[in-house]
Image: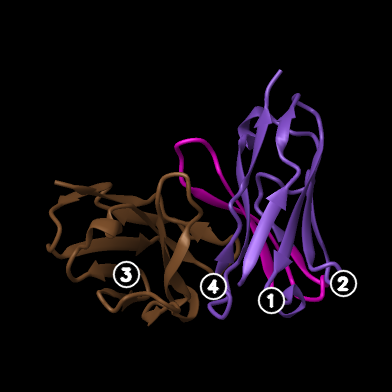
Amino acid sequence: EVQLVESGGGLVQPGGSLRLSCAASGFTISTYWMHWVRQAPGKGLVWVSRIKSDGSITDYADAVKGRFTISRDNAKNTLYLQMISLRAEDTAVYYCAVFHAAVAAWGHGTLVSVSS
Amino acid sequence: EIVLTQSPGTLSLSPGERATLSCRASQSVTSSYLAWYQQKPGQAPRLLIYDTFSRATGIPDRFSGSGSETDFTLTISRLEPEDFAVYYCQQYGSLPLTFGGGTKVEIK
């Protein structure tokens, strides 16, 4: 069974840092672009970042560029999102996802709350 | 950035009725790279349609996608009780990838 499981979310003060992880099972992530998408409470979906299958290309939404870093460890079948200089507007559920139709998987999400 | 505008914001229908959801793009979507997702409360989104027309694995044939360039439609031919949810369109042909604001399909 294809599964993505995020972890690492929590409550952090403005200006703080967090590192999210996304462990995949049931398939090999090394074949696919991987993405992070976030959803603020009661709001819609917003794409955050993506990374190519071999890690050679990364892209970011303007709102997180320079503060978030996406990475992957294909040997561990795991995706990461390092977040620094967190702001209140970064508060959201963060999902990792594979958009490719062959997998089409999303994790259950991990909540990041930025508040003093 | 391609802005996706979904309409209506809320669709109130009864089981068995047909649902037509619209997604309009601010500029042409590259190679028809347009997807539709369903999201229920407390759950992650689920892929329904990709590449404008293609149904994802396990998606019933009452769901269909159509459209091109800037105008796209998701049609649910006959609503089942489990179809009441929020639906999002997404374009993945241009950076940044973008989602529409969503259409809530609620029970009338």
Q: Amino acid at mark 3?
A: Phe
Numbered disc in front, either 2 or 3: 2
Q: Confirm whether the magenta stretch covers residue A38.
A: yes
How far from the left and from the top, in percent, is residue B91?
48, 66
Q: Position of residue B78 (x, y in %)?
A: 17, 68
Q: Which residue is mark 4?
A: B93
Q: CA distance from mark 4 to mark 1?
A: 24 Å
Shade of chain A as shown in the rendered figure: purple
Secondary structure of residue under mark 1: loop
**In which chain is the residue bearing label 3?**
B
Question: Could you tell which of marks 3 and 4 lies nearer the N-terminus?
Answer: 3
B13 left or right of A26?
A: left
Residue A107 position, x and y percent, is: 61, 57
Which of the 4 image quadrants contains residue B93? Answer: bottom right
- Left or right for A103, reference A84: left
SS for dot 3: strand
* Residue at image point 19% right, 71% down: B77
Q: Which residue is mark 1?
A: A27
Give the residues in magenta: A32-58
Q: CA distance from mark 2 to mark 1?
A: 12 Å
Q: Are marks 2 and 3 in contact (CB under 8 Å)?
A: no
The answer to which of B44 and A2 lies nearer the viewer is A2
Residue topped by disc 3: B72
Helix or strand or loop: what does disc 2 sit on?
loop
Q: Residues within 10 Å of mark 4 (few under 14, many from 20)?
A: some
Which residue extends farthest front? A1
| Mark 1 crowd level (few <14, some 14–19, many ≥20, 10 Å Cα) | some
In this rendering, the answer to whether B100 lies above or below A30 is above
- The colour one sees for chain B in the rendered image is brown
| Upstream in sequence: badge 2 or badge 1 | 1
